[in-house]
Every structure is written in structure tokens, then in C-alpha cells.
Image (cartoon, rainbow, N blue to C red):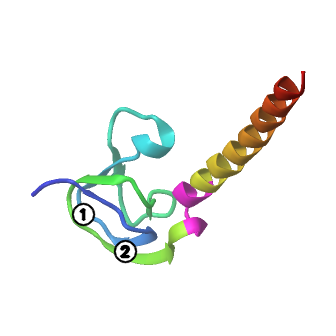
Amino acid sequence: MPASASPATANLSKAPKLAVDEAILTGESEPVNKSAAQGQNMIFMGTTIVTGRGHMRVTQTGPRTELGQIAASLREQRRGGHASSGAGSKRSAGR
């Protein structure tokens, strides 16, 4: 069975032998073992389930997830970058 991306952030209620690649969020090169135990029971949107199975209760979707917050932050920085480069272009054109 191919690996699949988690479509939402969720709490695990069952997770026998579940391993998740969280590199998209953490940069870690090795998959993280997950379980239903407190502190190991979160699956984040966009992370890849490498092995195992699990039951999860969705807690966040879209912009409310960690990945959604990163995307919003990048969008905001990009807007700020466009505004400053646009101002520089106007000054150059006026000379």
C-alpha cells in the first residue's frame, strides 16, 4: 500500500505500528512512531503516513492546521515583499 498524506490534523485513538514522515513540518529525515498515548497521538495535515493504520478524530482542517498557518505566513511575507519591490520600482522610474 502506498504512503498517503494526512488530509487533516487529528488525534489518534488507535494506532498500532503507525509511522509518520513529518519532514514537511520538522525537517526530520526519519519517520516518527505514533501511538494513541498522550504526547504521541497527533497526526498533522500534510504529513505522510508511511506504515501502519490508525483511527483518528479530526481536530483541525485547512487554515487552522500547522501547514495552513505556515502557508498563511508565507502569503503574508510575500505580500510585504511585493509592496517593497513595487515602491523601489516607482522610485527608479521617477529618476
Q: Amino acid at mark 1?
A: Pro
* Residue denoted by label 1: 16
User: What residue did someone put label 2 on?
Assistant: 56
Relative to the observer, which residue lies in front, 30 or 8?
8
Q: Which residues are magenta?
A: 63-69
Above or below, comparing residue 51 to residue 92 in the picture: below
Q: Residue 35, image x and y in percent?
A: 36, 61
Identify the residue at image location x=9%, y=58%. 1
User: Looking at the rendering, which quadrant does residue 13 occupy?
Assistant: bottom left
Q: Residue furthest bottom?
A: 57
Residue 37 within the magenta-colored segment of the rendering: no
Q: Please, what secondary structure does the residue beneath circle 1 have?
A: loop
Q: Amino acid at mark 2?
A: Met
Q: Is residue 74 left or right of residue 82?
A: left
Residue sitting at 37 percent across and 67 percent down? 7
Q: Is residue 68 rendered magenta in the image? A: yes
Does label 2 or label 1 sit earlier along the sequence?
1
Q: Secondary structure at mark 2?
A: strand
